[in-house]
Amino acid sequence: MKYVWKTIWFIQALATRLIPMILFMIAHAIGEVYVYNWDPLQLLDFKKIPALFDSYLFLYTALGLIIVILFFMNLPIIARVMTVGILASQVLFFLQRWENYIYGTTEVDPYYDFYMRILFSIIAGFVLQVMWRVIKSSMKKLIYMITVRHSSKKQSIKKVPAKK
């Protein structure tokens, strides 16, 4: 029974870790409908969905799998910062594409900014994870040093034998 529960736990953990990848796909679909590239009724035919995503399907799948691996490697800060950064990048990407579509401008390339924001979210997550680990280990060392110093002071006080 122990192995059954471990298997169920693993499947549940994997399914919850795949939520960011699903969110990326949903956000992309909403963005494409928002900028008038996709017909919303096309999303009802599940066989056409992979063709609609084109190369973004591979991008979001790869990013989602990286996030799954980061969670299982016990690096949750990187994974969470990446998730938020990618979702924010998608929002800004589609807002810029919409602005380019409405005003007919081509001065700003939304694709370059989109990929750079994803890269910056990965770097920011890595920096925050490292800083968290450094702060956590420094606090442990500080508490240890304070404990050692405090216990050595107690031992240095001479005990006066009790008078009878």
Image (tube, helix red, strand yellow):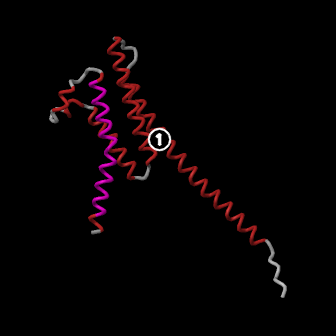
Determine the image quadrant of residue 52. Answer: top left
Looking at the picture, how far across and down is residue 17, in whole percent?
34, 48
Relative depth, front residue between 24 and 59: 24
Q: Give the residue furthest to the top.
A: 104
Q: Image quadrant of residue 65? A: top left
Q: Quadrant of residue 114?
A: top left
The residue indicated by pointer 1 is 125
In the depicted view, which residue is nearer to us: 40 or 52? Answer: 40
The residue range painted magenta reads: 5-33
**Which quarter shows the C terminus?**
bottom right
Residue at left 20%, top 33%?
A: 49
Give the residue displayed 35% in from the left and 24% down from the top. 94
Q: Position of residue 59 (x, y in %)?
A: 31, 35
Does residue 44 sit above or below 11 in this rendering?
above
Q: Is 63 contained in the magenta span?
A: no
Main SS, magenta residues: helix
Q: Secondary structure at mark 1?
A: helix
Residue drawn at (76%, 67%) of the image: 153
Residue plotted at (44% across, 40% down): 81
- Amino acid type of the residue that numbered disc 1 sits on in the rendered structure: Gly
